Amino acid sequence: MRSTGGFHGRRIQKTGGSTFIISLPKNWVVSRGLGAGDTLFFTPRADGSLTVFAESGEANETERRLVEVSDDLEVEHLFRRLIGEYIAGYPLLEIRTPGRMSARTREVIRNFAQRMIGPEILEETAESVILQDVVGQNPLPIPSVIRRMHQMVRSMHTDAMTAFRGHDTSIARDVIERDWEVDRLHWFLEKQVTSALRDARILVSLDLSLPECSTYLLASRVLERIADHAVRIAETVTILGKERTPDRIMAELDRMAASAASALADALDSLDSRDIEKANAVIDAAKRITRERDHVLHELTSKRGRLAVGLAYVLESLERSAFYASDLAEIAINRAVESPARVEPADSSLAKKVVAEHPRA
């Protein structure tokens, strides 16, 4: 046996006619409570390595996470803490206060459970609330989550521009509320990836490699940011009040919104297809939108008050949305480059041609 840099080396031995075996480090076996007769599972990785894990058993106390909070914690701070605990991926969360839990703290926990995908209140006591993840680790494939997020984000931007164009506060409020749907999908995806990093069995169930998980997590973050800009456009409806946007400027903003939406769709297509040429076209389109922004910005120099502020917000959000699509295109290029090159089979026509031209002596 050799040990170096944290790695344990074992020689491969052959028994019988065709069976190869290796021994396992004793401290690893003992630390996991394993012994003779227990079953181990192996899963191959894209880099050629093997991941070894023990047979899955029943949930144990190590999967329960105790979260101690105080009743005087600010509502937003408590909610953020719960999101962090949720992303960590524990199947059971016990939120506990030093004394009797206040009604406000319980309300925050209930609101959190209703907004997230998975957590349900399992048990309540005077001092604690226990949440259980009832959907498991992989109820929805990560690529499907990304596609759903894209549909929602694109719809939000379309409706935000409709609300802005028509001064429709009801549509604007609906766009703002739907931002939660995008956030909860992003947090759910982040929880899946975090769990996969911690447990090889979950990674296997996702049917993705670690680089692919990282790629989709970055894509999810981009989509979540673009949704935030849809919200910002919707919020300008209140800022504008009864101010009317000049038709010429409105037409320019509509063109920019359409270009940004098209760029985002193409960026996601290039991510799926590993199409570097299409990804580069998205990056070029984002630069063109910047030039259009400069033209509209020149038009705004003659405007004053609410109209100027509202238009500036919309203009900036459209440009930022386009550049987030550009970021997604760069992620697509990186993914395409990481893909292994296709190897021609030995009996391909190319191989036959080489053999024919260079026969063995």
Image (cartoon, rainbow, N blue to C red):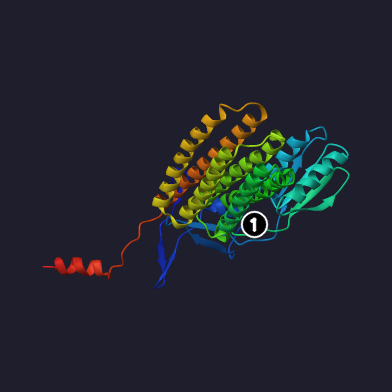
**Residue 39 in picture, x, y percent from top left:** 58, 64
Q: Is residue 23 above or below residue 226?
A: below
**Residue 335 in picture, x, y percent from top left:** 44, 50
Is residue 87 or residue 65 the one in the foreground? 87
Looking at the rendered structure, the number of numbered marks drawn on it comes to 1
Is residue 175 or residue 219 the one in the foreground? 175
Q: Tell me which amino acid carries mark 1.
A: Gln
Is residue 16 or residue 345 the one in the foreground? 345
Left or right position of 124 against 188: right
Left or right position of 253 against 47: right
- Say which quarter of the image contains residue 221: top right
Residue 101 seen: no
Left or right position of 117 against 277: right
**Residue 224 in picture, x, y percent from top left:** 61, 45
For this orientation, the residue located farthest to the front is: 247
Residue 266 seen: yes
Residue at x 52% of width, y 49% of height: 264
Left or right position of 348 against 327: left
Residue at x 69% of width, y 38% of height: 237
Is residue 319 or residue 7 the one in the foreground? 319
Q: Is residue 68 above or below residue 339?
A: above
**Residue 185 in picture, x, y percent from top left:** 65, 51
Q: Is residue 282 above or below residue 357?
A: above
In this figure, which residue is indicated by the disc labeled 1? 137
Tag 1: Cα neighbours inside 10 Å, few (<14), some, or many (≥20)?
Answer: many
Q: Secondary structure at mark 1?
A: loop
Q: Is residue 204 above or below residue 306?
A: below
Residue at x 67% of width, y 29% of height: 306
For this orientation, the residue located farthest to the left is: 361
For this orientation, the residue located farthest to the bottom is: 17
Please identify the quadrant where the C terminus is shown.
Answer: bottom left
